[in-house]
Amino acid sequence: MKFDTRKTALCGVLIALGVILSPYHIPVGATKCFPWQHLINVISAILLGPIYAVMNAFVISIIRNLLGLGTLFAFPGSIFGALLAGLMYKRFANTYVAALGEVIGTGIIGAIVACPIAILFMGKNAAIFAFVIPFMVSSFSGAVIAILLFELTALKKIVMKKVSI
């Protein structure tokens, strides 16, 4: 992978934003619904691609856990959504499809992966679909905010012009 200073700088800004917004979450069951992470995942996926989006999600999850602002569910709850959003945008070049990828990646795949994490590392009994609703709510709300942000700001113009960031 070629090192790109502009993409790295944008990663730093998005990671900082993800950490700064960490205190603002909605507790749902054993999870913390964090729509800002999903907003950042969609923006990262569209502007930077799937590899950078996954790296951003992973780093934000690590920092949130180190600061006590997140749970272990931050990892499956963000990484799979970022990956699928990035892959979907890369394939279809559509912000709505990227947002859908975030919702499916987090709300379904991430929720299913969270179940063994709850059982193995947190000692909690969890049904396989116990996390689907909270993860779906969080990822859907973040994806909607991302779509609104793209539709109502200059971000859409940047993406449409294919301006290198």
Image (tube, helix red, strand yellow):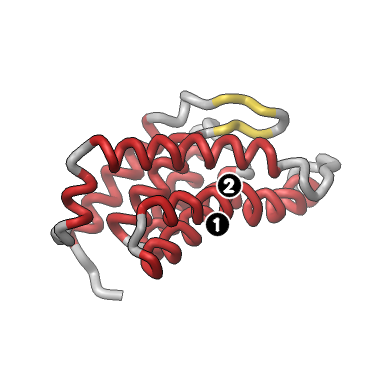
- Which of the numbered marks, if any, corresponds to residue 14? none
Residue 42 position in % (x across, y down): 40, 49
Residue located at (53% from left, 41% from top): 139
Q: Which mark is residue 77?
A: 2
Q: Quadrant of the N terminus?
A: bottom left
Q: Residue at coordinates 62% horizontally, 47% vertically from top-left?
A: 107
Q: Pointer 2: residues within 10 angstroms few (<14), some, or many (20+)?
A: many
Horizontal side of residue 87 vs 48, given as left or right: right
Task: Decide: few, some or many residues near mark 1? Use Cα within 10 Å; few <14, some 14-19, many ≥20.
Answer: many
Against 21, is 80 above or below? below
Do residues under tags 1 and 2 come within 8 Å of each other at their CB atoms?
yes
Q: Which residue is mark 1?
A: 80
Up-down: is 86 above or below 64?
below
Image vertical order of residue 23 relative to residue 116, above or below: above
**Badge 2 element:** helix
The residue that appears at 37% across and 56% down in the rendered structure is: 45
> Which of the 4 quarters of the picture holds residue 22?
top left
